Amino acid sequence: MRVRSALLPAILLLALAAHSAFAAAPRLQTQILGQSSWLSGSRASLRLRALDHSTGLGVANAQIRISLGEAGKAQLLLSSTTDAEGNLTAQFQVPDLPKGSYPMTVEVSALGEKDVVTRSIGVRGETRLLVTTDKPLYQPNQVIHLRALALKEPDLKPLAGAPVTLEVEDSKGNKVFKRSGLTSEYGVAFADFTLADEINLGTYRVRAVADSGTQEQTVTVSKYVLPKFKVAFAADRAFYRPGETMTGQVQADYFFGKPVAGKVSIKLSQFDTGFTDFALVTGTLDAAGHFSFTQKLPDYFAGVPLEQGAAFVKVETTVTDSADQSSTITSTAPVAQDSLRVTAIMEGGQLVSGVDNIVYLVVTTPDGQPTAADLTVKVNGGDASTVSTDASGLAEFHVNGGTGTVNLSVTARDAQGYTGSLKQDLYAGYASTSILARPDKAIYRVGDSLQLDVLTTTKTGTVYVDAIKDGQTMSTAAANIEAGKASVVVNLGPELAGTLELHAYQITKEGQIIRSSRTVVVNPANDLKISVQSDAATYAPGGTANLTLHVTNAANAGVAAALGVNIVDESVFALQDMQPGMEKVYFLLEKQILQPKFEIHA
């Protein structure tokens, strides 16, 4: 079972020297705080303390050696000494060992004594697996090209020679294809599956199975006719108010580039309990395949009083060419009473009592586009304060989290005179001791320095900070609290690329642990770039296309790499969309961060 560090950032391995009540007790005592399992080949961290049992004080300059493995085969992980308080933050590289349980031995020498603590450590190997296909939609008798990519955590290097099974399951749950093999030196495994003429239609599951787990995606198998031309609709504005006039543009072109000649029909509808048509516009495409129209919108839209005025017009456009071939697309245009939408987001998810909180104010147009605006803010009906959003539509406002409910009122106005407002109650729970972690940014790059400020209602004491990636504590640090604030700097090396969890915690006088957690993203510094060149701009059916692909690194130097190239009829994407190029996001971000925690609806 993988223990998520967001729930439990550290597992206590508290080791105390055993003493007999009838023998002279040794003075040297060892405490260890850290995880009971490590990721093979990763960077790990432990927090150790050497104590004088007779006084309870830390022992300075105690010699500490940490090793992993059975006697005679143990590998030395770290040799160091404690600081003036008897503490040691041990950071070391975990050996690249097979999955299993290994003894960890901690030897501490001080006060003329030697204390040896042995604990069992689980070493695990983790693999990120991704399966893709060449297109999202297939017909009977077509070939599904499957590709799996396996990368090893934490460095995301290719996992070569790993067994991977590629499977296909039809819409009835029948397993219709299965092939096993080993990944290449680039961590790639692939296979082709030819669909039969008579098969179950519907949603098929494409799956990659490895020792580390299973990853799958779905494709659609359906009998379809590819459209002969593509249709595009564009409105003259990003959003409308009820009663305003919409101007729309329709453009139709064959996939080989020639404009379509024919008729166009545009049906506009609004939604209440269902879609209700309120206008039908018909016409003829001009010689350039273009058609323009205007239509007054209804004065009322169901939903305008709700969801900050969110509603929409559905535009269904049908084009029929001279050969009586038709293509239909559906578009929407936002309709809102307020021209601006204001959303408040608390930096810690909710107000933290007793400390200064940042409330982020986001201003967007109804279609979700950020905009610069001037804001007037009132807290609990007090005096008004003014702030302004930047070009990304973001502004910061500071609120001291007391206890109970904080009433927030915001009005916004932009340079065009558009306005919007927000009234929201923010709740801060009561706690005798509170803590709030605040990184200086949300997105970093390898090589940057991350500064984490920790605010607390405790004026003095110690704050501990763990940096965790893939469930592994990669680094740990301690900082002294001065006037309710402590700061920790983390240097972001290549091993920290991806989703990084930051956990700040204190231990109260009552022995309770209070914590605050934040998540940041660290982009790698070694991104690859791909350029594609073809020997011609157009090709005849059945012709040969010569493509030249060039892969370079951040320094523009050539790199040997495995390439996946999909060549698909563009008209397929007119039936079902596909989002390529998501591999980087998939491998860098943890599944938890890919799931929405907060949504701003346009």
Image (tube, rainbow, N blue to C red):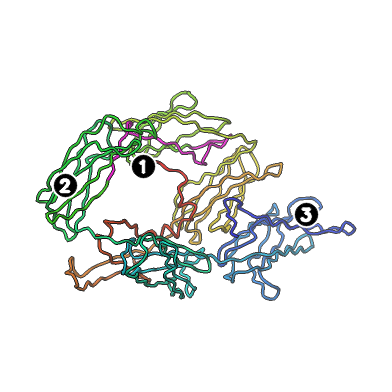
Decide if residue 408 is on the left or right side of residue 33: left
Circle 3 sits on which residue?
52
The crowding category of the residue bearing disc 3, from other C-alpha atoms within 10 Å (few below 14, some 14 to 19, many at least 20), is some
Q: For residue 557, say whether it is visible.
A: no
Q: Which residue is mark 2?
A: 264
Q: Is residue 291 above or below residue 560?
A: above
The tag on residue 27 is none
Q: CA distance from mark 1 to mark 2?
A: 38 Å
Q: In the image, what residue type sits under mark 3?
A: Asp
Three-letter residue code for mark 1:
Ser
Say if mark 3 contacts mark 1, CB within 8 Å: no
Q: Going by the image, does 386 lie left or right of 473?
A: left
Q: Which residue is mark 1?
A: 392
Q: Are marks 1 and 2 in contact (CB under 8 Å)?
A: no
352 and 210: which is toward the camera: 210
* Left or right, 192 with reference to 253: right
Residue type, label 2: Val
What kind of element bears circle 3? Answer: strand
Quadrant of the drawing holding the N terminus: bottom right
How far apart are labels 3 and 1 at the CA level?
Answer: 56 Å
Q: Residues within 10 Å of mark 1 (few under 14, many from 20)?
A: few
Q: Is residue 352 magenta?
A: yes
Task: Quadrant for residue 218, please give it.
Answer: bottom left
Front of the two marks 1 and 2: 2
Task: Give whichever of discs 1 and 2 has the lower sequence position.
Answer: 2
Residue 114, given in percent of the width and then of the height, sits at: 77, 64
Q: Position of residue 58 (x, y in %)?
A: 73, 52
In this picture, is 90 found above or below 309?
Answer: below
Give the residues in magenta. Answer: 331-358
Q: What secondary structure is found at the residue carrying circle 2?
A: strand
* CA distance for labels 2 and 3: 88 Å
Q: Earlier in the sequence, mark 3 or mark 1?
A: 3
